[in-house]
Every structure is written in structure tokens, then in C-alpha cells.
Image (cartoon, rainbow, N blue to C red):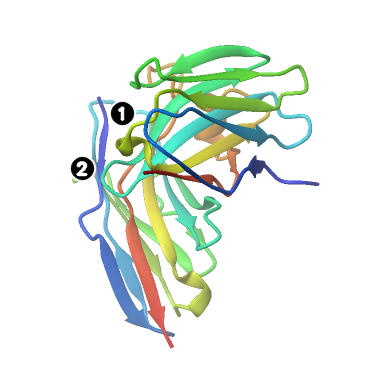
């Protein structure tokens, strides 16, 4: 079974700073996908970024980028020029690629509560 | 286009009671999946309904059940409530199965129902 570990329960940074959230995962599969989801105080989970394991290039979405280290099974999220609206819970998630198992979809980490201070 | 709607947003029950939560997916989506979110366990998959049929079920006791109607709206029911059932219950909708949607990132979440069991 796959596991996803987020070792930072909470982080706090000043507005405009850069922050990195850590995530490690464990799998024996070679075909899989990794995600970061954001859950603001409104509680609605929103996809931030998606990474395909077979792609060596790190995914980026505006101020959000990842550092994907496949051999180390590490998938960190970097937020540049942090904004007050980035305050949220951030969840790292994993799913095997088709046609593998894991019929119940995403496996989530326990989350990191990120607080952006003004 | 309306998003995923969950009702009620908050509710308080006592041990031994039962509760029914509702999820209306995005129009045209046939899959509704449910998750339990707690601080200790993070997000855990409960079950998925696709075209009125339960496709997958997570590792939860039989007290947790659900159904899906012909208009794709879904309800989940928890009977004989326990203190440990206090959680945020999230639903997600997708056009395809939760498995495929999880891979493509086309999984859309509601804002959840916060259940407190006293």
C-alpha cells in the first residue's frame, strides 16, 4: 500500500517570502502521479499542481513549483512571493497510473497548515 | 456552472444517533466520492458511487453507507454515531470514475459537512 508523509504539521512565514512544504511517499510502482491540493478556510479542496512521475521536468504553476526527486521519493512544493491568500492546509497526494490498482483513487498525506503572516 | 454542493455545512449529533449528509455534484458528473477528514488521520476514502452503483468502498465499518440517485445526487448515512465519527465529510464529483479523475486532476470537491458528535 502506498503511503504519503508530510512531516510539517504547521508552518508560518511572512508575506512575500518563499516557503517550501515537504512530502515523501512510498511506492513500488513506477507509473504514478503526484499532486498538491490546497484547502483554504472555506474547506474546498483545490488542485494546485500535478506531476507525472515519468516526467523529469518539475511542474510549475505561476508562483507554485515542485521539486520532484523520484529516487528519493520526495515531492516538495515551493511557493514564491507568498500572499495572504495562500494561507490554507496543503495536502500532498499520490495515485498509481493505469492500469494499476488503487481503485479508490488518491492517497493523501495528513496535511501542512501554512500561515502567511502580514 | 454550479460547483459541488454539500448540505448541511454544520451539524451536531449525540452518540447513538444517525446522520444523513447530501452531496449534489456538478451538472453532468456521474461519479460522487466521499472522504472523511480528521486531524489525526487526514483524508480517508469512504466510497464512490457511479451511475447509482457503489463502485468502491474504503476501510470503514458497515455503519457508513451511501446511495446515489438517478440525478447523480448522493447521500451518505452514518448510523449509531460514535465520538470518533466527528469529522469533516467531503464529497467530490467527476465526469469519469474517481480513479481516472484522480489521475487527470479532474476531481472537484465540495466545502464539506462538519459533523460533531457529542
- Give the residue at x 23% y 60%: A8
> Is residue B21 found left or right of B44 in the rendered image?
right
Q: Which residue is mark 1?
A: A30
Residue A53 appears in view: no
Circle 2 residues within 10 Å: few <14, some 14–19, many ≥20: few
- Residue A95: x, y in percent? 40, 32
Q: Earlier in the sequence, mark 2 or mark 1?
A: 1
Q: CA distance from mark 2 to mark 1?
A: 11 Å
Q: Which residue is mark 2?
A: A71
- Residue B59: x, y in percent? 33, 21
Which image quadrant for residue B75? top right
Q: Work out whether A80 lies above or below B86.
A: below
Residue B35 appears in view: yes
> Is residue B29 found left or right of B31 in the rendered image?
right
Q: Chain of mark 2?
A: A
Which image quadrant for residue A13? bottom left
- Residue B53: x, y in percent? 61, 11
Q: Work out whether B73 lies above or below B88.
A: above
> Is residue A105 found left or right of B93 in the rendered image?
left
- Give the residue at x 42% y 85%: A15
Hey, which residue is sitting farthest bottom in the picture? A118
- Residue A72: x, y in percent? 18, 46
Amino acid at each position: 500500500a502506498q503511503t504519503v508523509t508530510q512531516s510539517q504539521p504547521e508552518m508560518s512565514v511572512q508575506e512575500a517570502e518563499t516557503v517550501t512544504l515537504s512530502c515523501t511517499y512510498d511506492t513500488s510502482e513506477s507509473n504514478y502521479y503526484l499532486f498538491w491540493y490546497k484547502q483554504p478556510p472555506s474547506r474546498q479542496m483545490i488542485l494546485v499542481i500535478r506531476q507525472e512521475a515519468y516526467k523529469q521536468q518539475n511542474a510549475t504553476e505561476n508562483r507554485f513549483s515542485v521539486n520532484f526527486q523520484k529516487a528519493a521519493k520526495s515531492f516538495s512544493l515551493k511557493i514564491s512571493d507568498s500572499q495572504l491568500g495562500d494561507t490554507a492546509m496543503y495536502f500532498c497526494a499520490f495515485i498509481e497510473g493505469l492500469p494499476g490498482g488503487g481503485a479508490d483513487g488518491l492517497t493523501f498525506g495528513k496535511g501542512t497548515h501554512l500561515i502567511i503572516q502580514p | 456552472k454550479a460547483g459541488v454542493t454539500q448540505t448541511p455545512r454544520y451539524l451536531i449529533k449525540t452518540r447513538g444517533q444517525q446522520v444523513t449528509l447530501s452531496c449534489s455534484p456538478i451538472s453532468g458528473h456521474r461519479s460522487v466520492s466521499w472522504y472523511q477528514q480528521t486531524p489525526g488521520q487526514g483524508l480517508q476514502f469512504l466510497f464512490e458511487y457511479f451511475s447509482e452503483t457503489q463502485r468502491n468502498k474504503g476501510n470503514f465499518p458497515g455503519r457508513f453507507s451511501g446511495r446515489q440517485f438517478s440525478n447523480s445526487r448522493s447521500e451518505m448515512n452514518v448510523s449509531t454515531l460514535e465520538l470518533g465519527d466527528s469529522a469533516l465529510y467531503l464529497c467530490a464529483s467527476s465526469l469519469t470514475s474517481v480513479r481516472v479523475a484522480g489521475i487527470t486532476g479532474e476531481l472537484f470537491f465540495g466545502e464539506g459537512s462538519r459533523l460533531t458528535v457529542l
